[in-house]
Amino acid sequence: QVQLAESGGGSVQAGDSLRLSCAASGRELSDYHMAWFRQAPGKEREFVATISSGGLTYHADSVKGRFTISRDNAKNTLYLQMNSLKPEDTAVYYCAAGIRFVPNAIEYNDWGQGTHVTVSS
């Protein structure tokens, strides 16, 4: 089991940028495929992006071209660079670790506690 801790959330204006980080401990990040999900108030958890242990990436259509997932295995850290933020990006963002490179939350076993992102118009 790997422990995950997100950071970097906050309150910003539409069009601003944020970079979320997810620090892993207890296991090597390189052992896992990683992903970001988000959950807005009153909505189901939604896939944002995933990155394989080898660096392949896949982004949801809703964030493609604006968000970029990346990883630094040497620092045991996952990132989500979010540009051109929109009010509809407001959510709690979670990082997750799994053994399959898929966009499905059920396939990820280890989750962080989440970090809040609020985007005002």
Image (cartoon, rainbow, N blue to C red):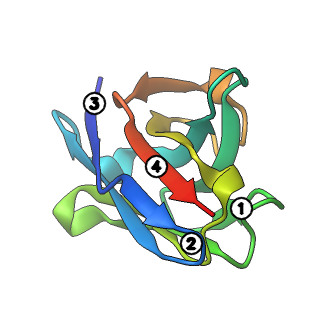
Tell us which disc is closer to us: 1 or 3.
1
User: Could you tell whether 23 is left or right of 43 in the image?
Assistant: left
Question: Crowding near pointer 3: few (<14 within 10 Å), some, many (20+)?
Answer: some
Residue closer to the observer: 62 or 16? 16
Front of the two marks 2 and 3:
2
Q: How far apart are marks 2 and 3 (CA)?
A: 23 Å
Q: Is residue 70 visible to the viewer in this orientation of the structure? A: yes
Looking at the image, is mark 2 or mark 3 earlier in the sequence?
A: 3
What's the distance in space between the residues labelled 1 and 3, CA to CA?
Answer: 23 Å
- Closer to us: mark 1 or mark 4? 4
Residue highlighted by disc 4:
117
Above/below status of 113 relative to 11: above
The residue to which callout 2 is attached is: 68
Check disc 4 and report its element: helix, strand or loop. strand
Q: The disc labelled 2 sits on which kind of residue?
A: Thr
Q: Please tell me whether residue 35 is drawn above or below residue 97 in the rendered image.
A: below
Q: Distance of mark 3 from mark 4, alpha carbons?
A: 24 Å
- Is the N terminus in the top left, top right, bottom left or bottom right quadrant? top left
